[in-house]
Image (tube, rainbow, N blue to C red):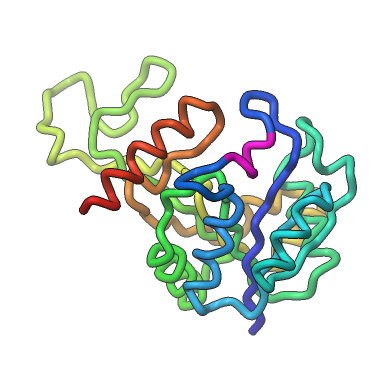
């Protein structure tokens, strides 16, 4: 069974320009993701997936592969559903693990443990999540608590907030779902894998990047 890691890296971004190339701890975000995938030692192949050939230099530098998606799948309206499907149609694998460079605080150990859990499971999809053990409401209605009583937070069932830091898909069911007019991202049996709350920190703005830099310094001291 062939397991591939895929790092999506769109060049265009609206809130933080060229965010995949933004420096964190002195190196671009994209390289943090590559290093984590390589350190896991679990992937048959590692790909950078981008519409822009500028990312090819990083693939060459780190000895991984580069897949150039169609340019229209690199704009701000293209969805991950579309570019993952395009990738799976053109790159042969049994399992795909997507590792986001914009979640740089996800650790190499978490990449390894997530991938091992996905490979060992019978799930078609595995989503990384943060388990929040606090009262959560949606559209003014309680999700994991009730207005009829006050419960201690430690007694609540945690909610599972999807982070997209790392995601796993079985290739064949994903392709079959999309080609049948269904959603590939959420198909078949879906499992949830908890990651550390810090690992779910996603870079979308300069402030997000500044927070990640500060957190990384604290983690390095530990």
Q: Position of residue 18 (x, y in %)?
A: 68, 36
Question: Relative to 28, is 40 on the left or the right?
Answer: left
Task: Please state which of residues 92 and 214 is positioned toward the viewer in this rendering.
Answer: 214
Residue 91 is covered by the magenta coloring: no
Image label count: 0
Q: Position of residue 130 (x, y in %)?
A: 36, 45
Magenta stretch, residue numbers: 18-22
- Is residue 87 placed above or below 12 in the rendered structure? below
- Which residue shows up at 40% across the image and 59% down it? 107
Question: Relative to 60, is 209 on the left or the right?
Answer: left
Visible in this render: residue 170? no
- Is residue 151 placed above or below 182 in the rendered structure? above
Question: To which quarter of the image does residue 21 belong?
Answer: top right
Task: Please state which of residues 133 and 4 is positioned toward the viewer in this rendering.
Answer: 4
Which residue occupies the extreme bottom position in the image? 1
- Is residue 99 placed above or below 122 in the rendered structure? above
- Which residue shows up at 38% across the image and 67% down it? 109
Visible in this render: residue 63? yes
Residue 21 is covered by the magenta coloring: yes
Question: Relative to 146, is 188 on the left or the right?
Answer: right
Q: Position of residue 16 (x, y in %)?
A: 62, 28
- Which residue shows up at 84% across the image and 56% down it? 68
């Amino acid at each position: 069974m062939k397991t591939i890691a895929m790092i999506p890296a769109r060049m265009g971004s609206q809130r933080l320009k060229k965010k995949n190339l933004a420096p964190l701890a002195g190196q671009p975000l994209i390289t943090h993701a590559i290093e984590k995938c390589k350190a896991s030692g679990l992937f048959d192949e590692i790909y950078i997936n981008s519409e822009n050939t500028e990312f090819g230099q990083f693939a060459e530098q780190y000895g991984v592969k580069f897949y150039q998606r169609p340019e229209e799948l690199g704009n701000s309206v293209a969805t991950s559903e579309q570019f993952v499907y395009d990738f799976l149609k053109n790159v042969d694998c049994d399992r795909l693990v997507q590792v986001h460079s914009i979640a740089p605080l996800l650790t190499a150990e978490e990449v390894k443990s997530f991938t091992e859990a996905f490979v060992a499971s019978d799930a078609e999809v595995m989503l990384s999540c943060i388990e929040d053990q606090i009262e959560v409401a949606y559209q003014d209605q309680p999700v994991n608590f009730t207005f009829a009583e006050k419960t201690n937070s430690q007694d609540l069932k945690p909610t599972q907030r999807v982070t997209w830091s790392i995601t796993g898909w079985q290739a064949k069911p994903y392709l079959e779902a999309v080609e049948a007019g269904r959603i590939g991202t959420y198909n078949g049996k879906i499992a949830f894998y908890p990651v550390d709350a810090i690992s779910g920190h996603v870079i979308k703005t300069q402030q997000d990047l500044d927070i990640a830099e500060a957190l990384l310094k604290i983690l390095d001291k530990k």
